[in-house]
Amino acid sequence: MKSKKVLVVLGGTSGERQVSLDSGKACLKALKKMGYKVSTFDPKIKPLNLIDRNKVDIIFNALHGKDGEDGVAQSYFEYLRIPYTHSGVISSYNAMNKIISKEIFKRNKIKTPKYFRLTRKDYKKKELLLFIKRKKMKYPIVVKPINEGSSIGVNICKNIINLNRSSKILIKKD
């Protein structure tokens, strides 16, 4: 096993790039210490489809956030037929997408807070008030992007003014 060539994929382009670089470097150090032949690959520098599958036995996926934990990187690894650490394409996509996750929780009777999805076309202060009333929600209300990891873009809104401001920012960004 120690003769295996491990490629640590780290960095990437998400808002969690620095965390990915840090965790990837820690993985690199640990794998080297264990005696593996290790190299790194950063998809911000070269696209994932340029990984040379003849030089890799397994991929250690140290990517975080978009294109790293959402099934995108995993689909490349599967296309290249290189085994990798991490969940598969579909489970990664489902876990990263907050709406799909919520639906899975509800279907499996796992308690989850009330929520609503706000789209660009729905967004108006009046619509926000209707969503809140319809869902019988109370403040604080948490605003989060549908497909970001960690706490990127999360805002805890204590009133309609905060909610309106946070929603505007998120809709412009995503």
Image (spheres, helix red, strand yellow):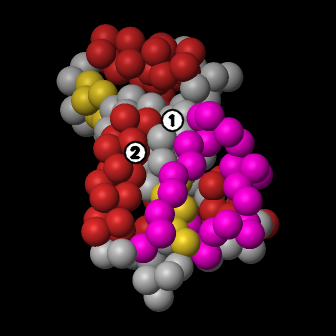
Q: Is residue 48 left or right of residue 88?
A: right
Residues packed near mark 1 inside 10 Å, few (<14), some (14 to 19) or many (20 plus)? some
Q: Name the spot of residue 47 as percent of width and height, x first.
A: 71, 42
Span of residues in magenta: 36-59
For the image shown, how many numbered marks are present on the structure?
2
158 in relation to 65, above or below:
above
Quadrant position of residue 155: top left
Magenta run includes residue 49: yes
143 in relation to 99, above or below:
above
Amino acid type at mark 2? Ser
Amino acid type at mark 1? Ser
Q: Nearer the viewer, residue 129 or 77?
A: 77
Q: Which residue is mark 2?
A: 20
Q: Nearer the viewer, residue 106 or 81?
A: 81
Q: Which residue is mark 1?
A: 14
Q: Name the spot of residue 150 as percent of width and height, x first.
A: 35, 44
Tell me the residue at 67%/72% (across/down): 82
Q: Name the spot of residue 70 as percent of width and height, x first.
A: 57, 54
Asked which secondary structure carries label 2, the reply is: helix
Quadrant position of residue 53: bottom right
Q: Name the spot of residue 158 as percent of width and height, x first.
A: 21, 24
- Which of the two discs, 1 and 2, labels the residue nearer the N terminus? 1
Tell me the residue at 51%/57% (across/down): 39
Magenta run includes residue 43: yes
Q: Nearer the viewer, mark 1 or mark 2?
A: 2
